[in-house]
Image (cartoon, grey):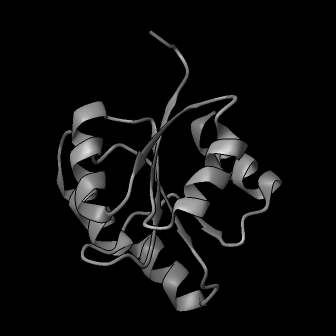
Amino acid sequence: MTDRKKILVIDDAMPFLYILNHILGGEFEVIYANNGEEGLKTAKAVIPDLILSDLLMPGISGYDVLKALKADEEMQHIPVVLITGSDAEEDKVKGYELGASGYITKPFKQDVVKNTIDGILR
């Protein structure tokens, strides 16, 4: 059993899962989901300390994941950081309006990822 904080990463692109595991795996317990539906089920099962969710995924989008989490009493406290290749200001505004705790753009910069997560979890 580990006392490391759990981070759930929801992304449909395996290379990004590997990169985030490389950045975060030494300090956090990293759990994966390949799409929004699987991400919501996994979040309910493990109640992570933080969720990183891709914004654009087939089926349930990152926005939909965020809305579902914030509507669920058991999970509404979990901070959600949206990750995406888009740096459009309207995407950020919409995410924050829906309750996102942060926003990280791809390609990932290791210090940005770590500083964003540390700022939220500390």
Q: In this orientation, which residue lies closer to the viewer: 104 or 93?
A: 104
Tell me which residue sits at (62%, 44%) in the image.
21
Q: Quadrant of the C terminus?
A: top right
Tell me the residue at 76%/57% (across/down).
Answer: 112
Q: Nearer the viewer, residue 34 or 96?
A: 34
Viewer-closest of 65 and 99: 65
Q: Position of residue 31 (x, y in %)?
A: 44, 39
Image coords of residue 97 (percent x, y): 40, 74
* Picture mark count: 0
Left or right of 44 on screen, residue 62:
right
**The residue positioned farthest toward the top in the image shown:** 1
- Taking the spot 60% from the left edge, 90% from the top edge, the residue there is 88
Rendered view: 106 above or below 11: below
Which of 11 and 4 lies nearest the eye of the viewer?
A: 11
- On the image, the x and y values in percent for residue 58 come to 31, 78
Quick one: quadrant of the N terminus?
A: top left
Q: Pick out the residue farthest to the front.
A: 14
Classify residue 19 as left or right of residue 82. right
Q: Is residue 119 above or below residue 29?
A: below
